[in-house]
Image (cartoon, rainbow, N blue to C red):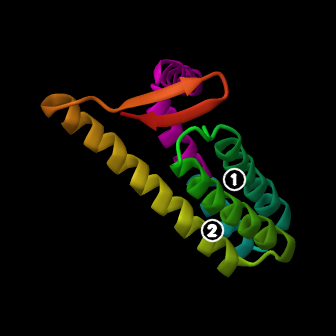
Amino acid sequence: MTQNMTLAYKNNSIQTASPAELTLMLYDGAIKFCNIALGALENNDIQKANTNIIKAEKIITEFRATLDFKYPVAKDFELVYDYIYRRLIEANIHKDAEVLTEALGYIREMRDTWKEVMRLNRVQNATGPKIQYVRTPQKLAIAE
């Protein structure tokens, strides 16, 4: 019963989350999967490492697919996501914890930056013009 309640809570959290919160959840997911993969590499569990690195790769792929290039910053994000994605692939091919740790560090930086954008948006909502998170069917961007 507790497991069903936990699943229902997670589903509700996802369904009611704003685009900004969903983005944060995806960053957290990528971080979680990289950490699981690192633990699996330490334990020589190659299959588990592979599975979790692929999950992180899929999240990064989704971030790249949803970039809105009408905003100039999207090109910068694309370059960062491309680099992270290539490092994840390299880490998976060679089962290299050092390369995976590097990719994880960049994902954490992106997540922390996103959290700061969300915080600034809350502050700005209280004091000035609102920053909007713009989500079209396939795109997520920040607009003023």
Q: Nearest the camera: 142 or 24? A: 142
Q: Quadrant of the C terminus?
A: top left
Which residue is under mark 2?
103
Q: Is 21 left, or right, of 72 in this rendering?
A: left
Q: Quadrant of residue 129?
A: top left
Q: Nearest the camera: 70 or 58? A: 70
Which residue is under mark 1?
56
**Residue appearing at x 67%, y 28% in the figure:** 138
Earlier along the polypeptide chain: callout 1 or callout 2?
1
- The question of residue 141 being in magenta is answered with no
Mark-to-mark CA distance, 1 and 2: 10 Å
Q: Nearest the camera: 129 or 48? A: 129
Identify which amino acid the numbered label 1 is placed on. Answer: Ala
Q: Are marks 1 and 2 in contact (CB under 8 Å)?
A: yes
Q: Quadrant of residue 143?
A: top left
**Residue appearing at x 58%, y 27% in the figure:** 3
Q: Quadrant of residue 1?
A: top right
- Say above or below: 43 vs 25: below
- Say above or below: 132 vs 30: above
**Range of residues picked out in magenta:** 1-30
Q: Secondary structure at mark 1?
A: helix
- Asked whether the viewer can see residue 45, the reply is no
Identify which amino acid the numbered label 2 is placed on. Answer: Ala
Horizontal and vertical percent position of residue 141: 51, 36
